[in-house]
Amino acid sequence: MVPKQRAAVPPLVDPTENVVRRQNDLRAADEHLAQVRQENIRRELTLRETFERRLAEAEAGRLNALLELIRLEMKTGRESASAMAETLRVTVENTRLALAAQVENQRKEIDGRLSAIERNQSAGTGKGAGMNAFWGYLVAGVMLALALWSKLAR
């Protein structure tokens, strides 16, 4: 039988040195990780400040644009109201002039008719004058009788 060869055994190393080296490596990695995290936090804060400033500027611009729009609408509204008032004033004045002309024409027409009636009445004075008075008295009497009757009937 052939004797078996044994595998080479590495020399024994003190485990405490290995553990200490690993702990030192872990501490260094932890410190490096903490530094990276701090840098990331600083970078995020800087970005946040930048974006918040930009957002505030954009919001201020939006509000300023809205205010300008409101001012423009108010100005346009005032101008429009002023134009409407002027149009209304002109319309009222034109209507007044047209109505004054119509009233004047009607007055002249009525004056002409009244003049014709007066001429006819003066030409026919005495002719049937007593009969007109009779009818007037008769109608007044009937009206008086009706008024008295309605009072007494109550």
Image (cartoon, rainbow, N blue to C red):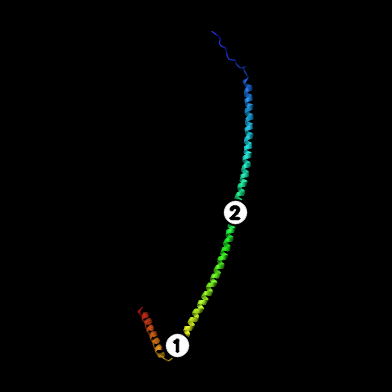
Q: Is 54 placed above or below 110 here? A: above
Residue 106, position as x, y percentages in the image? 49, 79
Question: In this image, 58 relative to 135: left or right?
Answer: right
Q: Quadrant of the C terminus?
A: bottom left
Would you identify the image quadrant in which residue 77 lies?
A: bottom right
153 sits left or right of 13 in the view = left
Q: Position of residue 44 (x, y in %)?
A: 61, 40
User: Of circles 2 and 1, which is in front?
Assistant: 1
Circle 2 SS class: helix
Q: Which residue is mark 2?
A: 65
Q: Is residue 61 above or below residue 126?
A: above
In the image, which disc is placed on residue 120? 1
Q: Amino acid at mark 2?
A: Ala
Q: Nearer the viewer, residue 117 or 53?
A: 117
**CA gap, disc 2 to disc 1?**
81 Å
Quarter-wise, where is residue 34 in the image?
A: top right
Label 2 packing within 10 angstroms: few (<14), some (14-19), many (20+) = few
Q: Position of residue 7 (x, y in %)?
A: 58, 15
Q: Earlier in the sequence, mark 2 or mark 1?
A: 2
